[in-house]
Image: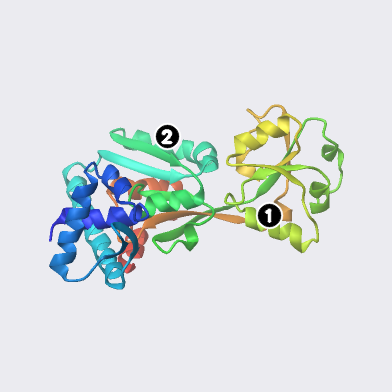
Amino acid sequence: MKLSQLQYICEVANQGLNVSEAAEALHTSQPGVSKQIRMLESELGVPIFSRAGKRFVDLTPPGEEILQAAQRILREIDNIRRIGQDFGADDEGVLTIATTHTQARYVLPSVIQRFRKRYPKVRLQLRQGSPQQICALAAAGEADVAIATEAVATSEKLIALPCYRWNRCVVVPAQHPLLEKNEPLTLADIAAYPIVTYDFAFAGRSLMNQAFEEAGLRPNVVLTALDSDVIKTYVELGLGIGLLAKMAFDPQRDLGLRMINAAHLFPPSTTWVGIRRGSYLRGFIYDFLELFAPHLKREGLKAALHAE
């Protein structure tokens, strides 16, 4: 049994059983991947993949168990490398953060600025995407941490740790009629106008929908977007009023818009950090997490990882 064979079956599974894409990701040839998998199956005495002709169509029952064991072995090998790096040069390396646009644009800059002062030799990589994409990156080991509101807490492959709670606001152009209201904003006030807000996968959208449903209202969502800046752009163009995370409104930059607090209308959302189960975290990652969420102390994080 070779380590490369375990890498091959894991990558084939990651690529949806597409051997060609697995070979490309591993910088090798498709026939080579297929041959090594056949050799491993012959050595083990069981098929790992069921086939239709030469094409893989599914994992066999023993193949599912073998895949899980192979993934654990590869994770531990990665952890061994990280241990060596940590003790060899504890202030150098790469920190990859998978997160959403709102976190990257409005929450992380001050954290990263402080982190860079402490660890000038650590190279930072920000990988942006939907919550589901972010979780997939962390689960595959392509990101050290995932930071998002949705999906992280429900991912079976990640340890989820709550960081902070936030709520929403309505943004409107200057001189908008909603700015003339003397009473607190209501859900009916919002539903009376076309709405520009987040895509369904983002930023607590399910909580927003639930609030309107419970009030017996059907909001007129005319545009959804993947990030807060796009939402604000279309509000400025007059497409509708914006419903977004309160942290995403910057009065010094959003000069053409005005913000109305809507925190009393919706349940608060929680932003989570997700870490792949069984990971070894380098020292500077612990420090980054504590800078991001001060209650996430190193010893508590180690205990959570050890428990898993």
Give the amino acid type for the residue marked by disc 1 in the picture.
Answer: Met
Residue pointed to by mark 2? 113
Q: Quadrant of residue 171?
A: top right
Q: Residue 84 — which label?
A: none
Q: Identify the colour scheme used.
A: rainbow
In the displayed structure, does residue 223 sit left or right of residue 51? right
Residue pointed to by mark 1? 208
Q: Residues within 10 Å of mark 2 (few under 14, many from 20)?
A: few
Number of marks in the rendered image: 2
Residue toward you, 3 or 206: 3
Q: Quadrant of residue 74?
A: bottom left
Secondary structure under tag 2 reads helix
Quarter of the picture holding the N terminus: bottom left
Give the amino acid type for the residue marked by disc 2 in the picture.
Answer: Gln
In the displayed structure, does residue 16 sit left or right of residue 255? left
Q: Residue at x 16, y 44 (%)?
A: 88
> Can you give x and y, in whole percent of width and height, for residue 181 in the image?
86, 42
Comparing labels 1 and 2, the label whose residue is closer to the camera? 1
